Image (cartoon, rainbow, N blue to C red):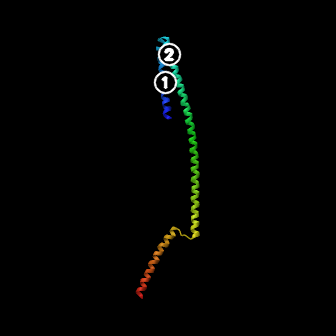
Amino acid sequence: MIIDVLSLYINLIEKLIDIVEGKKRREKVLKTPLGETLTKVETAQEHLTDAIEAIDIIRKQVILERTQLDTLLLEVENKKAQYNEASKDLKDAKQLLNKDQEKLRKVLGINSKREKIIGFISGIIASLIAALIWKFLEIIF
């Protein structure tokens, strides 16, 4: 579609150049016979008609593309609003999930990670103390 627009634009420019060059040749046309002059005028008129048609086609394509662009911009705005709403919903859901997890841990008596680590280390220390007491009692008895 863009290639078509560009080719129409290039054709339009070529025709306009031909028209401008035709104005420069007017002096020569005045010196030629009347039949040749009329032929050249008809040719120039055809070129002008073609140029006007090309301009109309380009204008229609520009209007169509502008409409498509406006539609796409509206879709982008809608998607942006949907994204913002979904992000807010996700944030709210994460907050609720964290609150629910804390409540569930309290109800089930599940310790936090920190408490589990402290319990593990104190268990190791208690095992070492128990082993030392056992060895001490073996030596005494």
Residue at 45 percent across and 78 percent down: it is 127
- Closer-to-camera residue (97/119): 97
Where is 119 relative to 4, above or below? Answer: below
Q: Of circles 1 and 2, which is in front? A: 2
Distance (Cα) linking label 1 and label 2: 17 Å
Q: Is residue 4 left or right of residue 99?
A: left
Residue found at x 49% / y 32%: 4
Seen from the viewer's position, the closer of residues 36 and 102 is 36
Where is residue 33 drawn, in percent x and y? Answer: 48, 11
Give residue 77's quadrant in the image. Answer: top right
Q: Quadrant of the C terminus?
A: bottom left
Which residue corresponds to mark 1?
Answer: 15
The residue shown at (56%, 31%) is: 60
Location of mark 2 (residue)? 39
In this rendering, the answer to whether 136 lies above or below 28 is below
Image coordinates of residue 100 in percent, x first then y, are 58, 63
Tag 2: residue type?
Thr
Marked residue nearer the N-terminal end (1 or 2): 1
Rate crowding at label 2 as few (under 14), some (14 to 19) or many (20 or more) other CA atoms within 10 Å.
few
Q: Residue 135, percent across and down?
A: 41, 83
Q: Secondary structure at mark 2?
A: helix
- Residue 117 percent across, percent down from the top left: 48, 70
